[in-house]
Amino acid sequence: MGAQESETFGYPAGMSSAETAEQDITSLVETRAALANGHVRELRKRARLTQRELARALNVSPPTVSRWESQLRQPRGEAAQRLADIVRLLERLSDPESAKPAVAGSKASRGSSTSDKSS
């Protein structure tokens, strides 16, 4: 069950509980900072997600997401950890560096189709 839990939060199965606790705390602090500077809202909008859609993914109400983004409230407990996981996911999806292998692969496939057309 421990391996399933760590996989759920995106951590390698072999991590100790101290390592996962450190990761959890770090991600919570980073997520709260991202909320404070508007990064979470920016990531959400870049992903074309509404507050309602994000709320559904987090199993909270849309007004809760609005309060977090407006800094009227701070996420806590399980919702805070789920938000941290979603922020990490949205950052990976919006990072141009993480998209390079897929882009490189598509360029290679375009290159081969171009050579096929000229043959």
Image (cartoon, rainbow, N blue to C red):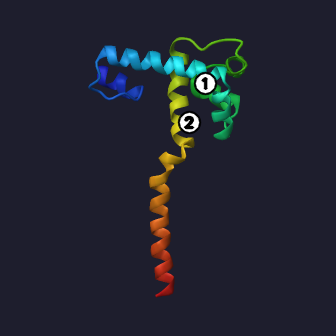
Which residue is depicted at the point 56% across and 11% down? 76
Task: Please give left or right for residue 78 compared with residue 75 in the image.
Answer: left
Which residue is depicted at the point 63% across and 40% down? 47
Any part of residue 90 in sight: yes
Q: Secondary structure at mark 2?
A: helix
Task: Please give left or right for residue 79 compared with residue 52 in the image.
Answer: left
Q: Count neighbours of disc 2 (C-alpha within 10 A) and say few if under 14, some if 14 to 19, many if 20 or more.
A: some
Instruction: Report which residue position mark 2 lands on.
Output: 90
Q: Count neighbours of disc 1 (C-alpha within 10 A) and say few if under 14, some if 14 to 19, many if 20 or more.
A: some
Closest to the observer, 16 or 82: 16
**Furthest-left residue in view?**
14
Q: Secondary structure at mark 1?
A: helix
* Amino acid type, callout 2: Leu
Which residue is depicted at the point 58% across and 28% down? 57
The answer to which quarter of the image holds residue 80 is top right
**Furthest-bottom residue in view?**
119
* Amino acid type, callout 1: Ala
Circle nearer the viewer, 2 or 1: 1
Of marks 2 and 1, which one's residue comes earlier in the chain? 1
Q: CA distance from mark 2 to mark 1?
A: 12 Å
Tell me where residue 29 appears, x and y as whole percent.
52, 17
Closest to the observer, 31 or 78: 31
Res. 34 mark: 1
Tell me where residue 5 appears, x and y as whole percent.
36, 22
Task: Relative to 115, say whether 31 is above or below.
Answer: above
Q: Quadrant of the N terminus?
A: top left
